[in-house]
Amino acid sequence: MSNLSSPGVALEDMPLSSTDRCQWRCSAEGCGHQWAARFQFRTRTVKPSGCPECWKRRNRAPGPGESLADANPALARQFRRNLSRPDRGPDTLRPQSHDLCEWECAQGHFWPATLANRTNGRGCPDCTGHGRSPFECNVAMLVEAASGLSVELDHRLRLPGRREDRFDLYLPEPTPGLLIDLDPEWTHSRPGSLERDTAKTTAALAAGLDMERIRSRGLPPVPVHDLAHHEAGPGVNPEDWAEAVGVVLRGRGLSWRQLTPAEVTAALTKGAQLWERVVAGPAVSAVNVAPHLEEEFVANLTNPGKAPDRMPPGCNDVCLWRCRKPDCGYEWKAILNSRALAGRGCSQCGHARVGAANSRPGPGESLAEVNPTMAAELIEVVDHPGWTAFDLLPTSNKTCQWRCPESHCRFEYPAPLNRRTGQSSGCPQCARGRTVAARVRPQPGKSLQDVHPAIASELLKVIDEPHLTARNLRPSSTKLCRWACSKPGCPGRWKATPDQRSRRGGSGKRCPVCRPPRKSRTQP
């Protein structure tokens, strides 16, 4: 390197924020390209600049057999689109390209990541290994191959006074079983990690369990008495960590052998397959589990353009659905797994089915059997032609057409069944008649017979309602009645209302035969 802006200033005398323009030479093998760039661009912590020729080489169009599709077909199948250069795809991208692309995992999750990161082993951030990781899977398979012992991943125990704890590796064969936790720096250098590791180890040893911890080189030992400190790394090379597990096993007198390169490759392949099974989910799509979903699917609201045939049954994408029944066509939103795994369908049809099932009576529960008198008044069920009283519960809310059983009425009216049984309501026409009759009926001691017995003795009949008597009439009643004079020998008969007869002390509407003639008002 040489300083072009200040030739006399050496590298060690330049601050990291220097804006001097310098000459650089690429240290990559087979390159040696020289270029000019400012010192601060090379030293910045976020995206420092590098050799432009190497960058071009990494991002140039791949040659035969160099593309992502050729070098890593499995990764190419997860590619969805190139966010940096939309015209470049798996056939025109090199595996170490720094293009930002969108990916889709086997669980149906979408996320952005550079192609180089994916090639270097970065996976889906939303997929969980349920307590496992590809690092642990690889270490477990290497330990199995070198020791000949079975290894269980993510062994869970509930220790006294604690919630359920997870242990990375468990070897059940050396009785009573050996628990091993792997502590790589990238997960155990965070604040509070040492305190959590110490509490977990102390609880396990206090419970009489046999436990060992293997920690990344540079991490402080776990301060637990009589706990040996084993180191591996730095980094997460599974072979280094498996060798550290081998030191622990050999110290306990267990067998351990050195693996050949072919055996290491086979173990790592087995670990990769184990990890794929952990996060891949079911190998069938939602349509394989529930074929009718393809017909009812309208749109994927979470990931537009993605159909159920490309989604696993457990996918949590929110989709829009339309009922396939021609008489329904209802549209609703629902998560895919609730339809494929839980079997949920159209809510409108479900409400109709539940309503119909709840409204159908069992043996001895129908209206015809419980209340045959009311059933005799039923004409029809308005919204369900053909239904009879045997198809209705007495508490049904269905509107029915009824006919009054009284011979003088026979009025027809609509009403819900539960209103008739719950409130004992009946014919509204008869109810109005009873209300009117109640208004005109006198209170005790205030009838025409009680107040004006002399007038009541002259009543022959109520013309429009012959069944009424003087005890059923108020003195102020306006019903037209026929009267007969009570004087002996008087043949007087006339019509008047009780109100007319009882007004002004009984002077109104007297007998027209025996009442005195009016005095003439003419002057003499």
Image (spheres, rainbow, N blue to C red):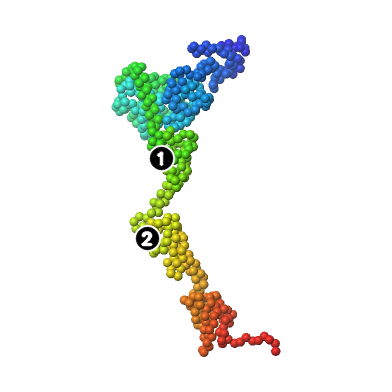
| Residue assigned mark 1 | 292
Three-letter code, disc 2: Ala
Residue at screen point 47% across, 45% down: 330
Q: Is 7 placed above or below 303 here?
A: above
| Residue assigned mark 2 | 368
Q: Quadrant of residue 17?
A: top right
Q: How far is mark 1 from mark 2, CA to CA? A: 41 Å
Quarter of the image with the N terminus is: top right
Does residue 174 show up? Answer: yes
Between 186 and 486, the one nearer to me in the picture: 486
Does residue 247 show up? Answer: no
Query: Crowdedness of circle 2 by 10 Å Cα count: few (<14), some, many (20+)?
Result: many
Three-letter code, disc 1: His
Residue 419 location in percent, x, y?
45, 59
Residue at the outermost right position: 524
Residue at screen point 46% across, 64% down: 412
